[in-house]
Image (spheres, grey):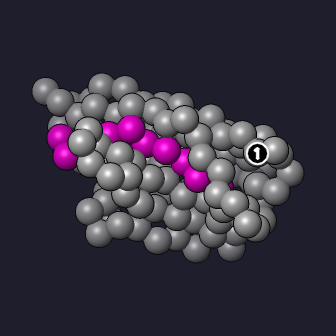
Amino acid sequence: QVQLVESGGGLVQPGGSLRLSCAASGSIFSSRTLGWYRQAPGKQREWVATIASDMGTNYAHSVKDRFTISRDNAKNTVYLQMNSLKPEDTAVYYCQLRGLSVYYWGKGTLVTVSS
């Protein structure tokens, strides 16, 4: 069973930065694709970024050039560095691990961008 625990959320002013972390249990971490998603109040969950086992990355257009996803397989941890934050980035951020036949999710961490 895989468990994912996000951390690093909080309140930040527009233009500021935060780094989210997601620690995973289990032995399949290094071979799987990992992702970050977010859900703003009253909206559907949306994809933010993914990183494959070969370190290839992809980003949603809305965060490209501002956010960076990375992973440390030795620590079973995936990160999301968020720079130049905007109020519209306010959301609960979730990490995802793509298993062979099931997707695993964390419980999320809240990011609030406000002055």
Residue at point 76%, 55% (across, down) = 29
Would residue 65 appear left or right of 54 to someone viewing this image? Answer: left
Location of residue 33 with respect to 112 vertically, above or below: below
Image quadrant where residue 25 sits: top right
Disc 1 target residue: 2
Would residue 15 appear left or right of 61 to someone viewing this image? Answer: left
Residue at point 46%, 33% (across, down) = 109
Q: Position of residue 39 (x, y in %)?
A: 35, 46
Residue 17 falls within the magenta-colored stretch: no
Would residue 86 appear left or right of 37 to someone viewing this image? Answer: left
Report the quarter where the N terminus lies: top right
Q: Which residues are magenta?
A: 87-97
Number of numbered discs overlaid on the protein picture: 1
Image quadrant where residue 110 sits: top left
Location of residue 59 with respect to 19 vertically, above or below: below
The foreground one among 63 and 72 is: 63
Report the quarter where the C terminus lies: top left
Q: Position of residue 42 (x, y in %)?
A: 24, 42
**Main SS category, magenta section:** strand
Query: Extreme right residue here?
Result: 27
Location of residue 14 with respect to 100 vertically, above or below: above
Location of residue 109 with respect to 56 vertically, above or below: above
Q: Which residue type does callout 1 highlight?
A: Val
Q: Position of residue 101 (x, y in %)?
A: 73, 66
Residue at point 26%, 62% (across, down) = 62
